[in-house]
């Protein structure tokens, strides 16, 4: 089961909910999906230094609520909320630019934008944060075994029940690509009631891309 289904998608309903929450008619549905993906990707790139983990989007009539989960919220909010206002302008500009590009922009229809920043209490229990950290270190050509083992140690010390990390590609600049698996504790992927966090992040090295996949079983 672990190699067939995304662990988070497998648990939507009992444990997780959707990152985008809204209702749309048939014609608007595709527009909203592409729009969400566009400015979610822009936010994940812009706020990478703040340790962004997840971006949730809620839509209602002429209103968009964005909930950003970050490790360092002070970097996003800024002094006296200046960073938040700048971020709001950036998102509004991204949305308008996208709508003009695809031809769905209507100058008469205005939308209200609301941004909420949520701090992450334990970042080492977030699969995306761990995978991004490993990918950045591999891109800096640090020894992969030391990086992965240190990450597993931090995950287990943070209170996880188990963790698994898989690297795939030309690891350490090898001529032939290979796949390496590292595991500690218990990862019951077939049990729906177990809270499994999963993320897959590519690492661009001088030898090519190395795929990093992380599974974390929380208590």
Image (cartoon, rainbow, N blue to C red):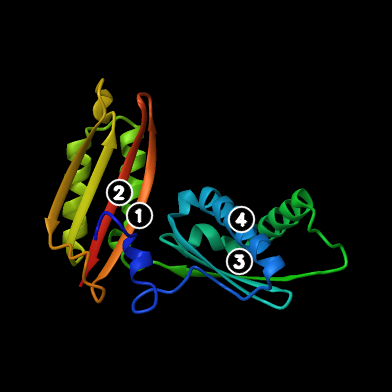
Please give the label number shown on residue 213: 2
Kindly check if marks 1 and 2 are in contact, taking CB atoms under 8 A apart as contact.
Answer: yes
**61 in relation to 127, above or below:** below
The residue depicted at 19 percent of the width and 57 percent of the height is 163
Q: Residue furthest right?
A: 108
Q: Secondary structure at mark 3?
A: helix
Instruction: Specify which label sits upstream in the sequence, 2 or 3.
Output: 3
The residue closer to the viewer here, 169 or 145, is 169
**Quadrant location of residue 66?**
bottom right
- Say which residue label 3 marks: 80
What residue would you read off at disc 1?
A: 199
Q: Position of residue 184 (x, y in %)?
A: 12, 55
Q: Where does the image place residue 126, in percent across and percent down from the top left?
A: 33, 61
Q: Earlier in the sequence, mark 2 or mark 4?
A: 4
**Which of label 2 and label 4 is nearer to you?**
2
Q: Quadrant of the C terminus?
A: bottom left
Q: Is residue 113 above or below residue 178?
A: below
At horizontal 37% and vertical 38% (from top left) the residue drawn is 203
Can you identify the residue that label 4 sits on? Answer: 39
**Within 10 angstroms of label 4, few (less than 14), some, or many (20 or more) residues?**
some
Q: In whole angstroms, how far apart are the C-alphas of marks 1 and 3?
A: 34 Å
* Residue neighbourhood size for the residue with mark 3, other residues' Cα within 10 Å, grouped as few (<14), some (14–19), many (≥20): few
Task: Specify which label sits upstream in the sequence, 4 or 1.
Answer: 4
Mark 4 and mark 3: span between their CA atoms? 25 Å
Judged left or right of residue 43, residue 212 is: left
Q: Earlier in the sequence, mark 1 or mark 3?
A: 3
Q: Residue furthest left?
A: 185
């Amino acid at each position: 089961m672990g190699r067939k289904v995304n662990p988070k998608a497998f648990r939507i309903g009992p444990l997780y909910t959707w990152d985008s929450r809204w209702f749309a008619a048939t014609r608007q549905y595709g527009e909203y999906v592409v729009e969400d993906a566009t400015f979610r990707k822009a936010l994940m790139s812009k706020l990478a230094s703040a340790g962004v983990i997840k971006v949730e989007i809620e839509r209602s009539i002429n209103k968009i609520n964005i909930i950003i989960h970050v490790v360092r919220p002070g970097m996003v909010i800024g002094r006296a909320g200046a960073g938040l206002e700048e971020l709001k302008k950036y998102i509004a500009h991204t949305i308008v630019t996208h709508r003009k590009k695809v031809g769905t922009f209507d100058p008469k229809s205005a939308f209200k934008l609301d941004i909420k920043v949520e701090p992450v209490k334990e970042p080492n229990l977030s699969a995306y944060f761990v995978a991004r950290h490993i990918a950045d270190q591999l891109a800096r050509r640090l020894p992969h075994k030391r990086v992965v083992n240190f990450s597993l140690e931090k995950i287990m010390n943070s209170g996880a029940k188990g963790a698994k990390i898989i690297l795939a590609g030309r690891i350490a600049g090898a001529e032939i690509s290979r796949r390496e698996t590292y595991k500690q504790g218990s990862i019951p992927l077939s049990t729906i009631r177990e809270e499994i966090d999963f993320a897959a992040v590519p690492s661009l090295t001088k030898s090519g891309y190395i795929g990093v996949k992380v599974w974390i079983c929380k208590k």
